Amino acid sequence: MEAVQSSVDMIWVMLGAMLVFFMHAGFAMVETGFTRSKNTLNILMKNLITVSLGSILYFIIGFALMFGTSAFGLIGTEGFAMLGREDVGFFVFQAVFAATCATIISGAVAERMNLGAYILLTVAMTAIIYPIVGHWVWGGGWLAEIGFIDFAGSTVVHLTGAVAAFVTAWKIGPRIGKYSGKIVNSIPGHNIPLGALGVFILWLGWFGFNGGSTLAADPALVPPVIANTLLAASAGVLATAGYTRLRYGRIDPSLTLNGALGGLVGITAGAANVSFIGAITIGLIAGIIMTEAIHLLDTKIRIDDPVGAISVHGIAGIWGTLAIGLFDTSGGLLYRGGAEILGIQTLGVLAVVAWTAAATGLGLLLIGTIVPLRVSAEDEESGLDFAEHGSQAYSMQGVLKGNSSTPETSFAHRLNQLGDDPEVQKS
């Protein structure tokens, strides 16, 4: 019977890993839909490379730093390349989480970051920055020892990725044309339906993200975790739809789509610790503060985040982590448990923000000595699809712009014409 239960548990965790992996399709669709068509291929390549490179680096280095024997509660020290480890299923589940953290950066720096610089930053995130945070919380590190709670990663995954995204977006600056003096210009995405598809994919994947974090097919734990995930996301949608209707006079589609993600990020830390009413409340508040955070970053702080990643994953992540101090059914402030949990949660958030900001800033300084962090103005204006990849995502793109000759200069076209080049034939 024990062997059967162990097999069922492993199947459940592997199903969760596959759902989290599928979330990368959602991230790619959200980022693609919320940005301009001339950068579509670049976005798809970033997301594909992130999950591929991240998995390899996490296997070689990251998993050991995160779950190896702890050195002073700060970092793991053994198990590199899984040497001496037999928990392969657990590694797979954690590897897709690591890639998720890194891909958060992609949306915030879309349309202007050099692909080579982004890849090097992904190396730093998946090999060092994220695993150290993970060790503190999930690997038996110092935050775990003082009682910090983050069930599935509002802070470990989402806040870490968002802080790195904030630092990077600030460092490379806004897209050309985003700001004109005191005027904030809107740069609409080219395909909101595609972004909506991405949100639905992410929502589906989140059932594996939170549900799989039980690490066992526990009939007493899995259903309420998934129910809380559903309720918080739904509340995030309704809160954002209602709030934008009151604030702007209409329901804003892109913000409402992000409202679902804000609710999901918010509940991730406490999915196993709060009641159904607590989950709904967390989702409602997450949707509202996420909306205000996007407006604040865009117009006051002037951080250009094309998809709202910093607000969705960062601000909602902070809220979800702190909310445990209020709504935890076994010791939250609203359950007569005092302020101890809230204090520990606050300390954990501050520590993760400080480490991630400092490490990312240092990483960007080093990367900047190797490759430019940002593409040239000319490449940005023409679009990163052609500048970085020599092609474009949509075959009618040049025709619709009144430039029918563009497809003939694509990388694929040049390859097809090699045999017709007299100089090539001579060689």
Image (cartoon, helix red, strand yellow):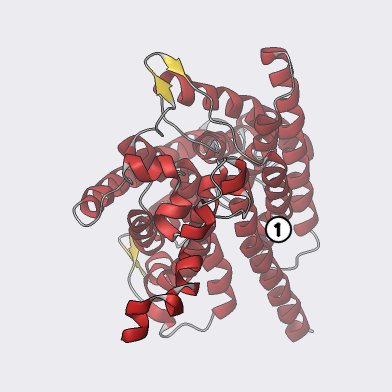
**Extreme left residue here?**
369
Q: Is residue 66 visible?
A: yes
Q: Give residue 379's position: percent from left, percent from top.
A: 37, 46
User: Which residue is tagged 1?
Assistant: 211
Instruction: Specify the quadrant that holds the N terminus.
Output: bottom right
- Image height of 188 relative to 250, above or below: below
Q: What amino acid is labelled 1 in the image?
A: Gly
Look at 56% across and 47% down and name the residue there. 398
- Secondary structure beneath dot 1 equals helix
For label 1, count other residues whose C-alpha is less than 10 Å away and answer few (under 14), some (14-19) or many (20+). many
Quarter of the rendering containing residue 54: bottom left
- Image height of 426 relative to 128, above or below: below
Q: Is residue 274 left or right of residue 144?
A: right
Q: Is residue 163 visible?
A: no
Q: Give residue 339's position: percent from left, percent from top.
A: 53, 30
Look at 67% across and 14% down and name the residue there. 248
Look at 67% across and 68% down and name the residue there. 18
Q: Is residue 411 left or right of residue 234?
A: left
Look at 68% across and 63% down and name the residue there. 19
Q: Give residue 271's position: percent from left, percent from top.
A: 68, 47
Q: Give residue 17's position: percent from left, percent from top.
A: 64, 67
- Image height of 34 relative to 91, above or below: above
Instruction: Specify the quadrant that holds the C terminus.
Output: bottom left
Q: Pick whichever, 264 or 200, lies toward us.
A: 200
Q: Pick whichever, 188 or 81, lies toward us.
A: 188
Q: Is residue 16 left or right of residue 318?
A: right
